[in-house]
Image: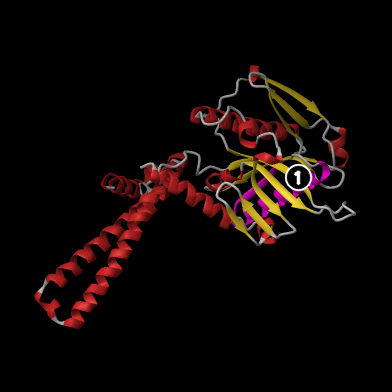
C-alpha cells in the first residue's frame, strides 16, 4: 500500500503537468489509473486513521483518568466502535486489492439468440434485449444496435449490440449463458405454461492492437439488407458478411445504411469474438470459442429462470430467488448482479 500511495501521488502530480495534458492518449491512460487507485488509497488512509484513533482510545483507557466509571464506559464504547469501523475498512481494502479481471473496465458486445422453444423463444429473446437496454440506460451507458434479425411476430432470432460504458463488462459478464423462461405465451389458447430458452454471450470489446486481423484471412461478402429500412436499404447491397477463415467465425452486420459503416461494425464484433476466444484459451477452464459461453441452448444448461406464473427470478449459480420479476424485466438487475459479484469476491478471498 505504501507503493500504491506513492504511485497515486505521482499520478496526481503528472496529471497537472502541461506535457501530460498536451497528450490526450497519455492523459486518458493516467486518468484511468488514477481513478482505479483513488478508492484504494482513500480506504487505506481511512483505515490508518481509525487505527490511530483506536490506539489513542486504548492509551486513554490505560491512563489514570480511566478510573472514573463514566469516563471509562465512554472510552470502552469508543474502542468498540473504532474496532468495528477498522474491521469494516480492512475488509473493504481487501476487496479493493483483489485481483481484477483485466477486462472489467471495458465496454462490451452482447449477443442474444433465441434457443429452444420456437417463436416463444424468439419473443423471450426480444424481452431480454429490452431488459439489457433498460439496464444500460439506468447506469447511463450507451447502447448501440449492431445487428438484428427479427421474426414476423416481433421476436428476435439474433441481436448483437454494443454497451459502451466504464465497467460494463465487470457487471454484464455474469449474463453469459442460457436464460430460461416459463410463462403462458400470448398464442397459447389453453393457458398452458411453456418453457423456452435464449442464449446470451457477453464479450469484452477488443482494441485493434490486441487482435490484429490479416485481410487475407477474411472473406467479405455483400448482400441486400432484410427487414424494415426503406427502399434505399432494399435496393443496395449495404449489408456485410465477414468470414474469418482460420476459425470459421461468421459475422453479419446490416443495420447501417453505409456498406463501409457495416464493415467497420462487423470487424469490431469479429475482434471481440476473437478476444473472447483468446481469453477462454488462456483460462483453460472452458473450451475455446464462443460456444463455451452460451452452450447449446438446452434447458438443462440454464443459469437463470424467469418464472412468470410464480413472479420469481432464480439465478441457479448462487441459489438466489427474487419475487419482483416485472422489475427485473424492466432492467432492475442490480440485486442479482450484486449478489453474483459478492460471490466472486468471496471466492477470491478464500484463495488468498
- Residue drawn at point x = 57 percent, y = 51 percent: 319
Residue at image coords 76%, 24%? 221
Residue 299 lies, in percent from the top left, at 70, 41
Give the image quarter of residue 186.
bottom right
Residues in magenta?
118-145
State the colouring used for the structure image.
secondary structure
Q: Residue furthest right?
A: 189
Task: Please give the name of the residue rendered at 80% of the width and 52% of the height, measured from the top-left corner.
Answer: 193
Classified by dominant secondary structure, the portion drawn in magenta counts as: helix
- Is 53 on the left-hand or right-hand side of 338? left
The residue closer to the viewer here, 233 or 228, is 228
| Rendered location of residue 247, percent (x, y) | 64, 21
Q: Is 133 part of what is drawn in magenta?
A: yes
Residue 253 located within the stretch drawn in magenta:
no
Q: Quadrant of the C terminus?
A: top left
Query: Does residue 21 appear in this view?
Result: no
> In this figure, which residue is indicated by the disc labeled 1?
196
Which SS class for mark 1?
strand
Q: Is residue 77 above or below residue 351?
A: below
Q: Is residue 46 above or below residue 216?
A: below
Task: Tally the numbered discs.
Answer: 1
Q: Quadrant of residue 92?
A: bottom left
Amino acid at each position: 500500500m505504501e507503493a500504491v500511495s506513492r504511485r497515486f501521488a505521482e499520478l496526481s502530480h503528472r496529471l497537472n503537468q502541461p506535457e501530460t495534458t498536451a497528450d490526450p492518449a497519455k492523459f486518458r491512460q493516467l486518468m484511468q489509473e488514477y481513478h482505479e487507485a483513488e478508492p484504494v488509497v482513500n480506504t487505506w488512509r481511512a483505515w490508518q486513521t481509525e487505527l490511530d484513533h483506536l490506539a489513542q482510545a486504548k492509551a486513554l483507557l490505560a491512563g489514570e483518568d480511566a478510573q472514573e466509571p463514566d469516563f471509562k464506559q465512554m472510552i470502552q464504547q469508543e474502542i468498540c466502535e473504532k474496532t468495528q469501523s477498522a474491521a469494516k475498512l480492512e475488509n473493504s481494502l481487501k476487496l479493493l486489492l483483489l485481483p481484477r479481471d483485466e477486462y472489467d473496465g471495458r465496454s462490451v458486445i452482447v449477443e442474444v439468440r433465441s434457443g429452444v422453444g420456437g417463436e416463444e423463444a424468439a419473443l423471450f429473446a426480444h424481452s431480454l434485449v429490452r431488459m439489457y437496454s433498460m439496464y444500460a440506460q439506468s447506469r447511463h451507458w450507451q447502447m448501440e444496435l449492431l445487428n438484428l434479425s427479427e421474426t414476423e411476430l416481433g421476436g428476435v432470432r439474433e441481436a448483437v449490440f454494443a454497451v459502451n460504458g466504464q465497467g460494463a463488462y465487470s457487471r454484464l459478464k455474469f449474463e453469459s449463458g442460457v436464460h430460461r423462461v416459463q410463462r403462458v405465451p400470448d398464442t397459447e389458447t389453453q393457458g398452458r405454461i411453456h418453457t423456452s430458452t435464449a442464449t446470451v454471450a457477453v464479450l469484452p470489446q477488443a482494441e485493434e492492437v490486441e487482435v490484429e486481423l490479416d485481410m487475407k484471412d477474411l472473406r467479405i461478402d455483400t448482400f441486400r439488407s432484410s427487414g424494415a429500412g426503406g427502399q434505399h436499404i432494399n435496393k443496395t447491397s449495404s449489408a456485410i458478411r465477414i468470414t474469418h477463415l482460420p476459425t470459421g467465425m461468421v459475422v453479419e452486420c446490416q443495420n447501417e445504411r453505409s456498406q463501409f459503416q457495416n464493415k467497420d461494425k462487423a470487424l469490431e464484433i469479429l475482434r471481440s469474438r476473437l478476444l473472447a476466444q483468446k481469453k477462454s484459451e488462456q483460462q483453460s477452464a472452458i473450451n475455446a470459442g464462443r460456444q463455451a459461453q452460451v452452450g447449446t441452448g438446452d434447458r438443462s444448461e440454464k443459469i437463470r429462470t424467469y418464472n412468470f406464473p410464480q413472479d420469481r427470478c432464480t439465478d441457479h449459480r448462487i441459489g438466489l430467488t427474487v419475487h419482483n420479476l416485472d422489475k427485473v424485466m424492466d432492467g432492475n438487475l442490480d440485486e442479482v448482479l450484486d449478489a453474483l459479484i459478492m460471490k466472486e469476491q468471496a471466492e477470491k478471498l478464500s484463495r488468498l
